[in-house]
Amino acid sequence: MTNVPDPDHTRGATLLELVAVMDRLRSPGGCPWDARQTHESLVEYLVEEAYETVEAIETSDDAGLREELGDLLLQVVFHARIAQERADEAWDIDDVARGIVDKLIRRHPHVFADVDADTAEKVEANWHALKAAEKGRASVTDGIPEQLPALLRAAKVHARSATLADRLPVLPGEDDAERILDSIPSEEQFGDLLLTLASIARDRQWDAEGALREAVRRRIERIRRLEQTP
């Protein structure tokens, strides 16, 4: 049976139903487990749901993706409901939604204003420039969470510093790495190489994650020194 859109259904109405369900769960007479949760106690679930969403995407599990996005949405509503209960400086799901709506409009001046950005690259450059200005960031590397897995953090640092590439020193071993990668024809085999490197590091009792994390820190330090150079 196919899902036929209800002409009387307002898009987003079910989101309000979710908010109402969460209100009931957190209110007196609701669920004791939900009622005792805090921002801190929910962190593990937020992280878990994010990774499960990634897994659904990577395995092309469309039904699973829909379910996992619902679980992620629950986390957003849950945290907003907890914040709503504060005695001071409370905020709620409407404040969350208003914040992201305003941000999207502000960060897309090529759509909502008269800025020219007709390529994805220009859009991304504008986004990072606007974000840095809004947050008063002095470096392109500011705001990249240290808690990210080292490989993901390395990729983000590289992407953010692309405009400085011509001024940055060549990474140690970059030429050797290029020669090795020239012999690898596919992303799958590149993954095998990364797995092999992790295995060799373990055999040598090296911490591959920690080693990469330190290398990323050194790269960030070089980037920031360069940014401070007139």
Image: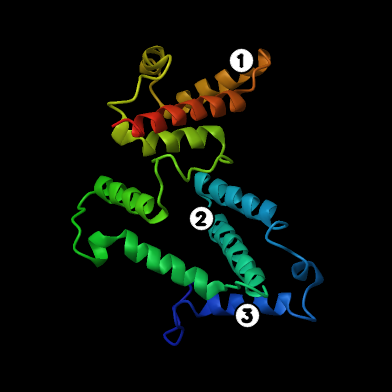
Residue that sits furthest to the front in the current view: 230
Depth check: 1 or 25 in front? Answer: 25
How many numbered badges does the structure rendering display? 3
Residue that sits furthest to the bottom in the current view: 8
Q: Which residue is mark 3?
A: 20
Residue 62: give its label.
2
Residue 200: give its label.
1
Q: Amino acid at mark 3?
A: Ala
- Looking at the image, is mark 1 or mark 3 earlier in the sequence? 3
Q: Residue at x 20, y 52 (%)?
A: 118
Callout 1–callout 3 Cβ contact below 8 Å: no
User: In this orientation, does residue 1 appear?
Assistant: no
Task: Please state the horizontal and vertical placement of residue 218, each as a whole percent of the image.
Answer: 49, 26
Q: Is residue 225 above or below residue 85?
A: above
Task: Please state the horizontal and vertical placement of residue 136, each as a whole percent of the image.
Answer: 40, 51
Indicate the quadrant containing the C terminus: top left, top right, bottom left or bottom right. Answer: top left
In three-dimensional space, the C-alpha distance between marks 1 and 3, rounded to whole angstroms, equals 53 Å
Q: Residue at x 61, y 61 (%)?
A: 71
Q: Amino acid at mark 2?
A: Asp
In three-dimensional space, the C-alpha distance between marks 2 and 1, rounded to whole angstroms, equals 36 Å
Depth check: 64 or 2 in front? Answer: 64
Task: Please state the horizontal and vertical placement of residue 129, each as a whole percent of the image.
Answer: 32, 49
Q: Secondary structure at mark 1?
A: helix
Give left or right: position of 25 versus 112: right
Q: Secondary structure at mark 2?
A: helix
